[in-house]
């Protein structure tokens, strides 16, 4: 009975180096994959930085256009007010 237990333990111990080799191979593959991902991530981060800069630039342009539209709107209000005044005077003249 002890011999059978010893044989089972020895059998398991014999499989350990193969299992360690498989794990080491997987770790090596993961290291390679991570090394491949690092430059790609850097490229992605750089691209995202450019995109964010462009978004910021667009926000500035939108703010400028909004300001211009607000000024034009104010001018139109002034013109409409003047035209209303002229219409009232014309109505008084023709009345």
Image (cartoon, grey):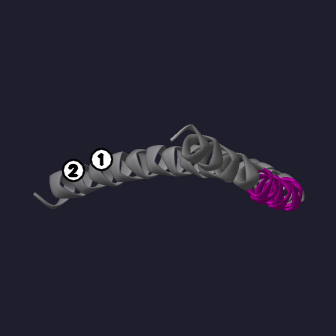
In the displayed structure, 29 sits above or below 11; it is below
Instruction: Assign the magenta stretch its main secondary structure.
Output: helix
Horizontal and vertical percent position of residue 41: 80, 54
Q: Which residue is mark 2?
A: 88
Quadrant position of residue 21: bottom right
Going 63% across and 43% down the picture, which residue do you hit?
9
Magenta extent: 17-38
Is 1 colored magenta in this rendering?
Answer: no
Most extreme residue toward the top, as rendered?
Answer: 2
Disc number at residue 85? Answer: 1
Query: Label 2 to label 1, Cα distance in Å?
Result: 5 Å
CB under 8 Å between callouts 2 and 1? Answer: yes
Of 17 and 23, nearer the camera is: 17
Number of residues whose C-alpha sits closer than 10 Å to that of mark 1, classed few (under 14), some (14–19) or many (20 or more) = few
Of 28 and 57, nearer the camera is: 28
Number of residues whose C-alpha sits closer than 10 Å to that of mark 2, classed few (under 14), some (14–19) or many (20 or more) = few
Horizontal and vertical percent position of residue 55: 67, 52
Of 14 and 67, nearer the camera is: 14
Going 28% across and 51% down the picture, which residue do you hit?
84
Whether residue 77 is visible to the viewer of this picture, yes or no, is yes
Horizontal and vertical percent position of residue 13: 71, 46
């Amino acid at each position: 009975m002890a011999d059978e237990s010893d044989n089972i333990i020895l059998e398991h111990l014999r499989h350990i180096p193969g299992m360690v080799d498989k794990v080491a191979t997987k770790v090596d593959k993961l290291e390679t994959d991570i090394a491949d991902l690092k430059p790609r991530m850097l490229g992605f981060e750089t691209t995202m930085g450019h995109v964010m800069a462009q978004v910021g630039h667009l926000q500035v342009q939108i703010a400028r256009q909004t300001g211009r539209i607000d000024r034009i709107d104010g001018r139109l209000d002034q013109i409409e007010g003047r035209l209303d005044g002229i219409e009232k005077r014309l109505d008084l003249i023709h009345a």
